[in-house]
Image (cartoon, helix red, strand yellow):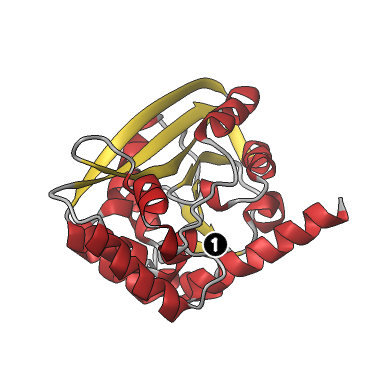
Amino acid sequence: MKQQVNFKDKFKRAVTGNFDLSGEDTDRFEAQCGLFGWLTTRLLNMVPPLPERPILDVGCGTGISTTTIIDHVRKETRVAGVDISPVMIDRAQGKCLKADFHLGDAELLSEITAGPFGGVFYTACLFLFPDVKTSLMQAREIMAHGGAVAGSYMETIQGKDGKDLIALAKETYPHLGIKHKKLFSFEELAETFDGLFRNVVREEVRFKMNREIVEAFYSIPAQSASLFPGEPVHVRLKKVKEVFQLIDTEEYFSVWNLVGGRK
């Protein structure tokens, strides 16, 4: 148990540190292609209608997903965001004055904000939680009856032919030292949803990118850590550039699995 706790704490510290370095790059990337706003919109469209209650954006980052939620819900609906990175929260507060933002751990939602919420959304963050079940249980606790929950899980980057380009690079170019590992699979995540929520729905989506955009995505410090954990940032960024020089192809697709349900 102590070993498990130490892993979780160490992992969360690493995540926080990497996202503290990622605010400016995240906003620059979003301005180029709009991926995170697009994902948030897809999540909102999975689970309508939402009860007339406040909405919580977990892993809100720089406020991109929060702003998207505000643009899609009723004008009078209160929206709140939670993130573990103080730098991300600062950027979100400066960008999105209509929302309430809280610095905190996604496993402790009931201690951060009481709700009840009509919707709890996790845009591009669930796969970063070392104890995702606890966070979803917390989400359920603070949700109103009939409230909706939805999240997005990144699978990989594929080429036009459907090949997993990250797995291909890891196998073909071992000298790069790609260590792309997942804490849990999407199937495990979906099973957790099945155990906690009703009317669970799933959807796979693909977001088309060119080489410049996909390289910009993995050049966000937090994203480069998914390929080269433990390496210094400047080393990771150099390796990211080399990866996409070696696997240069005509089209890239960022592949995501979405899952949603109701309390």
Q: Which quadrant of the view contains residue 91?
A: bottom left
Q: Is residue 1 left or right of residue 71?
A: right
Q: Position of residue 114 (x, y in %)?
A: 66, 49
Q: Can I make out residue 76 in this image?
A: no
Taking 245 as reference, is 254 above or below it? above
Taking 100 as reference, is 203 above or below it? above
Residue that badge 1 annotates: 83
Taking 108 as reference, is 143 above or below it? above
Picture residue at 68% right of the left edge, 51% below the top = 107
In this view, the residue in front, 33 or 59, is 33
Picture residue at 82% right of the left edge, 56% below the top = 3
Label 1 packing within 10 angstroms: few (<14), some (14-19), many (20+): many
Q: Amino acid at mark 1?
A: Asp
In this view, the residue in front, 80 or 180, is 180
Q: Can I make out residue 8 in this image?
A: yes
- Work out which residue is located at the far top of the displayed protein and give it: 199
Q: Is residue 149 left or right of residue 138?
A: left
Picture residue at 44% right of the left edge, 23% below the top = 201
- Work out which residue is located at the far right of the displayed protein and give it: 2
Picture residue at 18% right of the left edge, 39% below the top = 160
Q: Position of residue 74 (x, y in %)?
A: 34, 43
- Work out which residue is located at the far bottom of the displayed protein and give it: 234
Q: Position of residue 164 (x, y in %)?
A: 34, 41
In this view, the residue in front, 204 or 122, is 204
In this view, the residue in front, 104 or 243, is 243
Query: Quick one: SS at disc 1?
Result: strand
Q: Position of residue 123 (x, y in %)?
A: 43, 48
Q: The C terminus lies in which quarter of the figure? A: top right
- Work out which residue is located at the far left of the displayed protein and give it: 250
Total marks shown come to 1
